Amino acid sequence: MHCSVVILVGIVSMVQSQGIERCLNIVMLHQHCCAYAKSELYETNSKECYKETQNPNSCDFDVCLAKKGGLFMSNGTFDKIALEELLEKDFENYTGVSDVLKEKCLNKDLDAYVQEDPCNLKELGNCLRFYIMSTCKNWDESDECKKVKEDINKCQM
């Protein structure tokens, strides 16, 4: 009996892990489907970080974005308060989005957002990207993006 419970828990964990991975992959590949206005600075920083790291799925990409966004203190530690302020500013025209991002990504354990490259900033970035998509009110109306919206709505994190 005990062995069956352990195996069942392991299978459930594996299925949940695959579901989370699938959801994060959908978000990473289809961010263009959500038409939230992005600041010019974010767009510029994203392009520069992509050129520097060549891999938007790496921890280095999220570290680069944080550095260029001024999210590190002079002692080299991540500045959570600066990120909260940035989220409030970036989403001031979208009611409740910054509150969801702060609640789900800044005040919770981020272990569910680990992919192959464990790194606190990557986990945080994955969480932010997921909840930006899941709270999106301005979807691109293409067939591809309609399917992405359906898939995102099925993802439970």
Image (cartoon, rainbow, N blue to C red):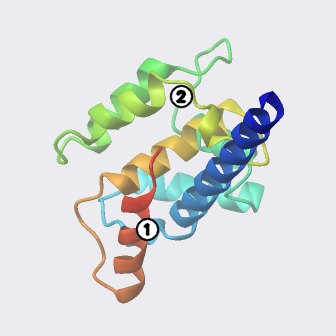
Would you identify the image quadrant in which residue 87 lies? top left
Q: Is residue 13 above or below residue 53?
A: above
Q: Is residue 49 above or below residue 32?
A: above
Residue at image mark 2: 71
* Separation of residues labelled 2 and 1 (CA atoms): 32 Å
> Where's the N terminus, which quadrant?
top right
CA neighbours of label 1 inside 10 A, class few (<14), some (14 to 19), many (20+): some
Q: Is residue 2 above or below residue 126?
A: above
The residue type indicated by label 1 comes to Asp
Residue under the image location 76 percent in, 62 percent down: 54
Lateral position of residue 87 relative to residue 47, left or right: left
Residue 111's spot in the image, x, y percent?
Answer: 64, 32
Q: Observer-nearest residue: 126 or 1? A: 1
Residue at image mark 1: 151
The residue type indicated by label 2 comes to Leu
Residue under the image location 35 percent in, 66 percent down: 34
Residue under the image location 79 percent in, 41 percent down: 7
Residue 105's spot in the image, x, y percent?
Answer: 46, 32
- Going from the N terminus, do you reach mark 2 or mark 1 first? 2
Q: Mark 2: which secondary structure? A: loop
Residue 74's spot in the image, x, y percent?
Answer: 62, 15
